[in-house]
Image (cartoon, rainbow, N blue to C red):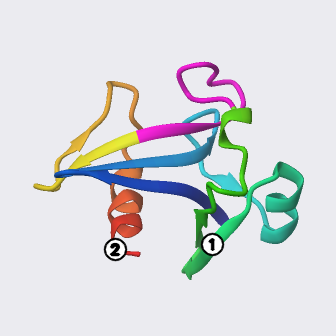
């Protein structure tokens, strides 16, 4: 099962989506979702199963997001990586954006 912990914020016509990824570019592959969340101190407001993916809407009130690495700080470990999508559906990322992420981000916006 691929876990997609995410934080989705909007501002005007922009969607900022933070995804918790392994090395900033790989989905986290774990079978025990609740154990993964507990061990990492991640709390969820909602979990949505979709095929081999589990989308986890992170509760930012309970989860100490600042205690995790961001992709800009370190891409060797699990870290939060921000992606920006404009209302016109165009994805704005830097050159290192993984190709697989666009469909995942679209799904998050729909949740």
Relative to residue 45, is residue 105 drawn left or right? left
> What's the residue at 89%, 54% (across, down)?
39
Seen in the picture, residue 54 relative to 106 is either above or below; the reply is below
Characterize the local packing of mark 2: few (<14), some (14-19) or many (20 or more) Cα atoms within 10 angstroms.
Answer: few
Relative to residue 85, is residue 17 drawn left or right? right
> What's the residue at 38%, 69% (across, down)?
107
Residue assigned mark 2: 110
Residue assigned mark 1: 45
The image quadrant that residue 61 belongs to is bottom right
In-front residue for pair 43/35: 43
Magenta stretch: includes residue 29: no
Circle count: 2
SS for callout 2: helix
- Image coords of residue 53 (percent x, y): 57, 70
- Which residue lies most toward the top here? 73
Q: Main secondary structure of the magenta part?
A: loop
Relative to residue 46, is residue 109 drawn left or right? left
Seen in the picture, residue 55 relative to 105 is either above or below; the reply is below
Give the alpha-carbon distance from disc 2 to disc 1, as whole Å. Answer: 16 Å
Asked whether the beta carbons under mark 2 and mark 1 sit within 8 Å of each other, the answer is no
Magenta stretch: includes residue 80: yes
Relative to residue 78, is residue 57 drawn left or right? left
Seen in the picture, residue 82 relative to 69 is either above or below; the reply is below
Tell me which segment is drawn in magenta: 69-82
In-front residue for pair 25/33: 33
- Where is the C terminus found, in terms of image quarters? bottom left
> What's the residue at 73%, 62% (across, down)?
43
- Image coords of residue 100 (percent x, y): 41, 51
Characterize the local packing of mark 1: few (<14), some (14-19) or many (20 or more) Cα atoms within 10 angstroms.
Answer: few
Seen in the picture, residue 33 relative to 90 is either above or below; the reply is below
């Amino acid at each position: 099962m691929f876990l997609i912990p995410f934080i989705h914020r909007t501002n005007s016509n922009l969607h900022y989506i933070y995804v918790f990824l392994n090395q900033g570019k790989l989905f986290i592959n774990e079978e025990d979702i609740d154990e993964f969340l507990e061990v990492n101190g991640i709390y969820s407001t909602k979990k949505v199963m979709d095929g081999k993916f589990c989308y986890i809407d992170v509760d930012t009130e309970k989860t100490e997001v600042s205690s995790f690495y961001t992709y800009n700080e370190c891409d060797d470990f699990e870290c939060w990586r921000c992606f920006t999508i404009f209302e016109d559906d165009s994805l704005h990322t830097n050159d290192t954006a993984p190709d697989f992420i666009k469909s995942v981000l679209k799904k998050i916006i729909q949740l």
